[in-house]
Image (cartoon, rainbow, N blue to C red):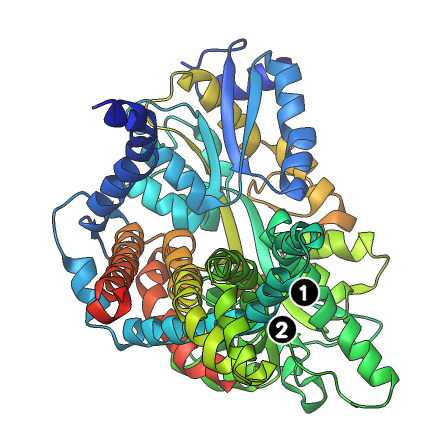
Amino acid sequence: MLGVAGLTAAAMPAMAQGNGQITVMAYGDSIFRDNYVSAVIEPFQKASGTQVQYFANPGSAQMLGTLRSQKGDPQVDVVIMDTTTAALACAEGLVEKVTAQQLPLLNDIAQQARDAGGECGPGVTFDNLVMIYNTDNVKTAPTAFADMAAPQWRGRVGLGGPPNIQGLALTAILAHANGGRWNDISKALPALKAIAANTQTFDPKPDAVTVVVSGQVDFTTNWNARAQLASIQSKGRVGVVLPKEGTAFQINTINVVAGSKNAAQARAFMAYALGTEAQKAFTERVFYGPTNTKAQIAPEALNRTAMAPQYRDSIVNIDWAEMQKLRDSWNQRWRREVVTAAP
Amino acid sequence: MIGWLLALPALCILGIAFLWPLAALFRISLNRTLDSGAMEVAVTGESYAKLLGDDFTWQLVWDTVTLAASASAMAVLLALPVALLVRAASPRWRGVLALMGIAPLLISGTARLVGWMAILGDQGLINVVLQGMGVIGEPLRMINNWTGVRIGLVESLMPYAVLVLLAGLGRLDGRLEEAAATLGANRVRTFFRVTLPLAAPALLAAWLLDVVLGISAFITPKLMGGGRVFVLATEIYDLALESVNWPAAAALAMLLLAGLLALLLLRGVFSWLPGRRA
């Protein structure tokens, strides 16, 4: 109780403490849900006395739909969603704006995570794009996305293509690596077409890890946290590489829903989730990078994230607000020029 | 009057569960998507104009319709022998055979497709057997492409065709076939000159039903298409849940609905043609 009380008192002096109930809407997949409940929600409940109901949703778009449909009478108090969708919620006034005066803790949050939230809630987790591979079939560990273009992997590659943000991130990374700015798709297209020539699926089903473990393909792109867990759970059958072309962050933001009936408790939860204790617990449990720069993460966990010192220079800084404007045209170019290059 | 009262509960459910959401969908389609991606409440036809002016939309329409038409034709072709077998069976076996014909409908479509993925995949049953026998060196690529989508769609549409054909063939007068046989026609000739022409309306009805279902099919192209088979339903999904462009998704859904209604209208007109009625 003292931990949360101290934190929130420093963060938001006017915030009400304890009791009541809030609803937190976030991802429904078991990796995120189970670990977030254990690492963040349960400790918060214990410390604050506020009960938290976890409202699981399949993805950010569905969460935005829920917020839009409940605009007049919100039933959700806090939402954790991808930055691209959160930006729309912020622009449409569906979530609260927040300043460092209201929440001094924002000063401890990495600038990229603050930028990701714009005027609204900041990033609460960093994830990043990696390449995963089947270590039984790929004997020499790959080091670059370009390795997927080698002739022997014809038909053995899976990519998450646009409009999925994995495909957008891959495009930006390859554009940057090939001498352009991240938003110059023309620099990425030759490398993308070369990989596409080996690509069997641009939408791995049932998911990117299963298709590699089952041997349907040998490589896919994936988000780091899931890939690291898969690598551990598969006892090394799934290899994870942060490719030398670099990586880019996928950022989940945390926001208090505008018009929340439990706004004080919701703000307390947001402050707790951004605090060092929750950030450390969640990163060490499931390898999402912390956005709080003061969180002291165990080295073995930090080294499995792109926040480790050795990877810092590999990060391609994508402006996701600008990406939103490019999304449609990139999607069309992928379909017309990249997907058509597949066998 | 009593008829209307009896129909009232169903009409209420239809209004609440279909017409009201449909009206809401139409209203969303008139909103505007800003450059930032945010949705602005407006009354504009911008989404419709953009979709109709985009070559890709028309390519999607063509691919969707040709996929549905060809898969439906194949489904009807495969369903016809099943329906004929059921019709020819003794009453004792007819029920069992009919149930077997439509048994796939008793299993979730997603579960069936996951099964197909296991059978048709690179490490699937067919490739393993063929490679084990030395027939092929490299695995045949049967999923994550149009081939996989066609196989999955034919399998999912076939039970509906069986149902329609069972109903249609059940009304055929068997005495006409007996008369043909009496006049010297062998079984093949009887089939092509008597049974098939008489079954044509049922075949057409089955094909049209399957086309309508095929045009709106989503799960099959999504799971079996490997992100490289683009049809109207997957595009609506991508617009709504990946690009989060609701006005465009709603507009495309309305256009798809209009197309399906036009198809059903065409079927109605076709069934009223004088020659058809005779």
Looking at the picture, how far across and down is residue B151, in whole percent?
A: 59, 72
Q: Which mark is residue A17?
A: none
Quarter of the figure with the N terminus of chain A: top right
Rendered residue at 68%/78% (across/down):
A156
Pointer 2 chain:
B
Amino acid bearing label 2: Ile
Looking at the picture, how far across and down is residue A95, in whole percent?
A: 35, 33
- Which secondary structure, mark 2? loop
Looking at the picture, how far across and down is residue A181, in whole percent?
A: 40, 74
Quarter residue A230 falls in: bottom right
Between marks 2 and 1, how big is the CA–CA gap?
9 Å
Q: Which residue is mark 1?
A: B116
- Which secondary structure, mark 1? helix
Q: Is residue A125 visible?
A: yes
- Foreground residue among A10 and A81: A81
Evaluate if marks 2 and 1 touch, with contact meaning CB atoms under 8 Å apart.
yes
Q: Is residue B217 left or right of residue A210?
A: left
Quarter of the figure with the C terminus of chain A: bottom right
Report whether mark 2 lies on the same chain as mark 1: yes
Depth-wise, is mark 2 or mark 1 nearer the camera?
1
Q: Which residue is mark 2?
A: B143
Rendered residue at 66%/86% (across/down):
A154
Q: Is residue A202 left or right of residue A267?
A: right
Badge 1: residue crowd in 10 Å (few <14, some 14–19, many ≥20): many
- Foreground residue among B26 and A23: B26
Badge 2: residue crowd in 10 Å (few <14, some 14–19, many ≥20): many
Residue A296 in the image: above or below residue B112: above
Pointer 1 chain:
B
N-terminal-most mark, 2 or 1: 1
